Image (cartoon, helix red, strand yellow):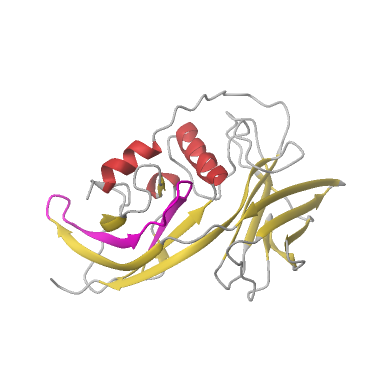
Amino acid sequence: MANIAFLMLLSCVEEIDIDFKIEDHDILAVDGMITNDTTAHRVYISKTRPYFSDKSPIKLSGAIVTISDDYGNIFELSEKGPGIYETEKDVYGVIGRTYYLDIKYDNDYYYAESTMKRKMLTDSLGYKWNSSREQYDILLYAKEPEGIGDNYMWHVYANGKRLTDTFDKIMFIDDEYFDGTYIDGMNVISRRIDYKINELDTIIVDTHSITEESYIFYTGVGAETGFSGGPFDTPPANIQGNISNDAVGLFHASSIAREKVIIYPL
C-alpha cells in the first residue's frame, strides 16, 4: 500500500492566494457544527476585529439561532454564555440530510446550509511504540469509500481531553490520492501534539467526514494563520466561509466514525 502519510501531505498542499485586508469595521463571525452524535451542538457567534488588531473578538449575546433540516425538523438554540449557543442534548444529525443555520442579530439575518456526508468505514485503532519520538503512535485501520470527493479531519482524545485543540494539531485530508483504498495503520497523532501518550491511557479518535467547502475553509484558515489558534477562534475576515450577508466563518454538518483503544504495555 502507498504511504498514506506521504499521500496526505500531497493532498493537503494547495496554492492559496491570501489577501491580507485591514477591515475598517467589525464583521459577524460564526463557527458552528452539527454531527450525527446525540449531544448538545454549539454555534459560536462573535464580531471580528481588524486582522492586525491585538483586541479579542467581541462575543455576541442576544441572537436568535435555529438549526433546521430538509425534513422539517427545527432545533432552537439557547444562549449558554456570551456568544455560545446550544441545542438540546438529545439532538443528532442524519447522514444525507441538509442542515440550515438561521441567525437573527440586531435586525440582520444570516444563513448557511450544509449536507451531512457519508462516514469513513473505520475498523479499529492500534498502537505501536515510536522509539525515535519516544511516543506511542495511534494507528487507524479503515476503508475509504469509493468515489472521489470525500474529505476528512481527525480529533484525538486522551482520557476524555481533546488533544487536537489548535489548528496545527488537527490532520486534514481529501481522498484524491487514496480513494477507495484500505488504510492499513495510518498514524493520526500529529507531531505537533505535545501530549505524550502513556500506558493505560484511553484514546478515542473521531474521524469527521466533512464537506469540501469545510476542507477548503479549514486549510485556508490554517495556511493564513500558520496553523495556530483554537478551532473556535474567529477566522480572519478575508476567509469568507459559507455564512450569508457578508459574515465570515463556517457552519457545517459532519458525520463521525469513532474508535477507541486502551494502551496496554507492549
Q: Residue at x 17, y 51 (%)?
A: 133
Please say whether residue 236 is visible from this viewpoint.
Answer: yes
Is 20 magenta? The answer is: no
- Given residues 81 and 34, the one toward you in this image is 34
Q: Position of residue 33 (x, y in %)?
A: 60, 57
Residue 91 pos. (x, y %):
64, 72
Relative to 32, is 6 above or below? above
Hey, which quadrant is residue 246 in on the image?
top right
Q: Is residue 201 above or below residue 32?
A: below
Magenta stretch encompasses residue 152: yes
Q: Which residues are magenta?
A: 131-157
Residue sitting at the far right:
107
In the image shown, does 237 or 4 lie closer to the viewer? 4
The part of the image, by quadrant, that contains residue 185 is: bottom left
Q: Is residue 157 left or right of residue 99?
A: left
* Image quadrant where one finds the C terminus: bottom left
Outermost residue toward the front in this view = 147
* Residue 2, position as x, y percentages in the image: 23, 46
Label count reads: 0
Between residue 33 and residue 24, name the one nearer to us: 33
In which image quadrant can residue 131 be found?
bottom left
Residue 205 visible somewhere in the drawing: no
Could you tell me residue 24's position as x and y percent?
Answer: 71, 26
Q: Is residue 89 above or below residue 158?
A: below
**What residue sits 48% from the left and 56% below the top?**
209
